[in-house]
Amino acid sequence: MQPDNLYATETSKENNQFVKDLSETVNKYGFIVHNESTMEMSHTFGNHGAEVAEDFDLHMIQICKPEKAAKSLSANPERAVLMPKFIMTFTENDKTQIRFMHYSEDNIRSIVNDEQFPASLAETYAKIISMIEEAK
């Protein structure tokens, strides 16, 4: 397997503002934030009785394009293992840090035996990165 890729960047926008701007940006391109009610991890952990520091502001943002995902998973449900796409955001040194893990076409191919999927998923990864850049 080839190395996978961690896209790491930052913005001077506050985390909540970046998340709001990202949501608007992804909607513009037919994507959605799939987990809007549970992406703010301090609330999610708190709802399960776990305590976190008052300034804990990790967001785990799941991006989805429902129409494309439905067609893709209907064609081959094995693809589901690579379908969740999460963007992580948190504050560090007064800046919002943004992280997104994505995979090479070769690694996708080694996980899911499927001719069309590696190129299609790589295209989606590139679009997510461009939407992050636009929202910054």
Image: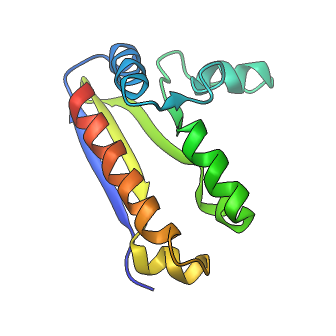
Residue 38 is drawn in which quadrant?
top right
Front residue (pair 1, 40): 1
The structure residue drawn at horizontal position 66% and vertical position 46%, both measured from the top left corner, is: 70
Image side of residue 108 versus residue 91, left or right: right
Considering only vertical position in the picture, is 94 above or below 132?
A: above
Q: Quadrant of the C terminus?
A: top left
The structure residue drawn at horizontal position 60% and vertical position 30%, both measured from the top left corner, is: 34
Q: What residue occupies the far left of the structure in this picture?
A: 12
User: Where residue 30 sits in the image (x, y, percent)?
Assistant: 45, 30
User: Where residue 35 sits in the image (x, y, percent)?
Assistant: 63, 28
Considering only vertical position in the picture, is 98 above or below 23?
A: below
User: Where residue 13 sits in the image (x, y, percent)?
Assistant: 24, 18
Image side of residue 52 versus residue 17, left or right: right
- Can I make out residue 85 in this image? yes
Front residue (pair 45, 1): 1
Q: What residue occupies the far right of the structure in this picture?
A: 48
Q: Quadrant of the N terminus?
A: bottom left
Residue 12 is drawn in which quadrant?
top left
The structure residue drawn at horizontal position 62% and vertical position 56%, both measured from the top left corner, is: 72
User: Where residue 108 sits in the image (x, y, percent)?
Assistant: 50, 73
Residue 48 is drawn in which quadrant?
top right
Front residue (pair 11, 123): 123
